[in-house]
Amino acid sequence: MTVDVAKKKRYFRKNIDFFKFVEKIKLWPSRTGTLHGIKSMTIRGNTAEIITHCNETFQIYNSKHSRAARCLRNKLFFHTCSTCKIPDWKLKKYSVTYVNQDYGSRL
Ligand SMILES: [Zn+2]
């Protein structure tokens, strides 16, 4: 007798905690449209401090509706930071992260 185990598919929940998402992809878009790599992230309640590899500090808010959240979801950035030197594999991983999501293959 075989037990039929349903295969569990894994998706990012649409309402996944924004901080968790940022923590996972370790990328942050600045206001000028540059994508930085995150060196460290300190969460303090509803805000977090991000330090990028180029030593810039960003204060971010846990909002899925913020500019940055939209940028990350829609992959709206113009170039990657040359100081942060985000490795290719990380960008690739990021580029497929949201394929199953709302905006997936628009780019
Ligand atoms: Zn940078």
Image (cartoon, grey):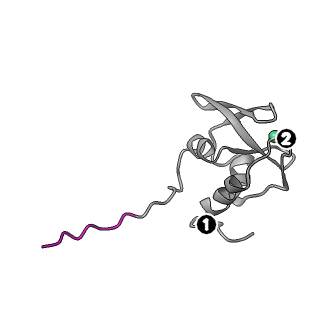
Q: Crowding at label 1, few (<14), some or many (≥20) Cα neighbours within 10 Å?
A: few
> Which comes sooner in the sequence, label 1 or label 2?
2
Give yes or no for residue 5 being in the magenta stretch. Answer: yes
Q: How many marks?
A: 2
**Residue 83, labelled with which disc?**
2
Res 95 → quadrant: bottom right
Question: As drawn, which residue projects farthest toward the left?
Answer: 1
Tell me which residue sits at (60%, 32%) in the image.
Answer: 46
Q: Secondary structure at mark 1?
A: loop
Q: Is residue 30 left or right of residue 98?
A: right
- Residue at figure coordinates x 53%, y 49% from the top left: 16
Q: Is residue 76 above or below residue 46?
A: below
**Residue occupying image coordinates x 49% and y 60%:** 11
Where residue 62 sits, quadrant-wise, is top right
Q: Is residue 26 or residue 70 the one in the foreground? A: 26
Magenta stretch in the rendered image: 1-8
Residue 1: x %, y % from top left: 12, 73
- Residue furthest top in the image: 44
**Residue carrying label 1:** 99
Ligand 1 neighbours mark 2 (CB distance < 8 Å): yes
User: Dot 2: within a 10 Å radius of its alpha carbon, few (fewer than 14), some, or many (20 or more) residues?
Assistant: few
